[in-house]
Image (cartoon, grey):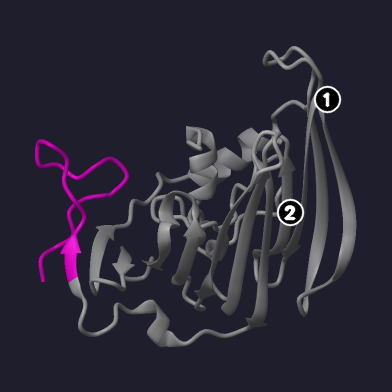
Amino acid sequence: MKLTKSVLIVLLTAAAVLAQGPPPPGGHGFGRGIPAGGPGFGMHGKVVTGAPYSADMNSTRTLTLPDGNVIQHTTTGKVARDAAGRTYSMETSIGGPLGETGPVTRISIFDPVAGYSYELNPATKTAIRRAIHTPPAGFESNRSSSLANRPANPNMVKADLGAQAVNGVTAQGTSITRTIPAGAMGNARPLVSTSETWYSAELQTVISAKFTDPRSGQLNFALTNIQTSAEPSLFQVPAGYTITEAPRGPRGEFRRGDGPPPPQE
């Protein structure tokens, strides 16, 4: 079965999005902000400092077809952030576009202090380095203001689930139900999708989430074995890796979003 472009984007959402700590979910798309085997760079969000943590990660997407056949993609691994805002993610994907021929492990390091991000391939002991693209001044505040001024969606219902301990961490729960009315996109009947997320204000990250959409299936995500510290070695390219710069475009320039070429060492 071929995956649609929109589903691929969901499955490839960067792990660093979560590690950098998006705001509490509300009005986001299916699984957005949840690592699910993604490359990470270019979608890291704001840098979060002073809230270090490390945790094991598990993400499973399940799609049941009309004939009863079930397609399942699983990603497991580890995510971490240090006090300076560096992030690390190690993800092993089984099934789906990244792991359809067997388990595939990807490691990503985002280092806003040094100004670089790295994508590591443990199988070849190679790392691709990119200069971090810095958003223009006022980007975050303008984006927040735009979201705040967005008119209310009559087809979306949001509910506060209160606070409770989730995997050993106090988290605030939010549920959202979205309805696409019949006929809006050629659908004979209304399409209803739901999400439930549990967000830790202390760690500034999502601890647990569940998304259900009749078009895309169900995505379950959780952080476990959560610690409020992280090993410094996680945020460094291991010894023995060959580091190369990110590929350039057809005319020699860096691709959009990669930032300027890093200085040669």
Expressed as whole percent of the image width and height from the top left, the position of residue 178 reads 78, 33
How far from the left and from the top, in percent, is residue 2? 48, 36
Instruction: Please state, as top left, top right, bottom left or bottom right, where the C terminus lies in the image.
Output: bottom left
User: Quick one: 136 or 91, which is closer to the camera?
Assistant: 91
Question: Does residue 251 belong to the magenta stretch?
Answer: yes
Q: Is residue 111 magenta?
A: no
Left or right placement of residue 172 versus residue 88 in this view: right
What's the residue type where badge 1 is placed?
A: Pro
Image position of 190 with respect to 165: above or below: above
**Label 2 element class:** strand
Task: Indicate left or right for 164 with 257 as reference.
Answer: right
Which residue does the image show at 47% across and 34% down from the upper left?
5
Identity of the residue drawn at 29% across and 82% down:
238
27 lies above or below 207: above
Callout 2 environment at 10 Å: few (<14), some (14 to 19), or many (20+)? many
Q: Which mark is nearer the camera, 2 or 1?
A: 2
- Tell me the SS state at disc 1: loop
Tell me which segment is drawn in magenta: 243-265
Q: Is residue 53 visible?
A: yes
Question: Residue 200: percent from the left, percent from the top?
Answer: 72, 67
Label 1 environment density (alpha carbons within 10 Å; few <14, some 14–19, many ≥20) = few
State which tag comes first along the sequence, 2 or 1. 1
Quarter of the rendering containing residue 244: bottom left
The x and y percentages for residue 59 are 61, 61
Q: Which residue is mark 2?
A: 210
User: Which label was assigned to residue 154?
Assistant: 1
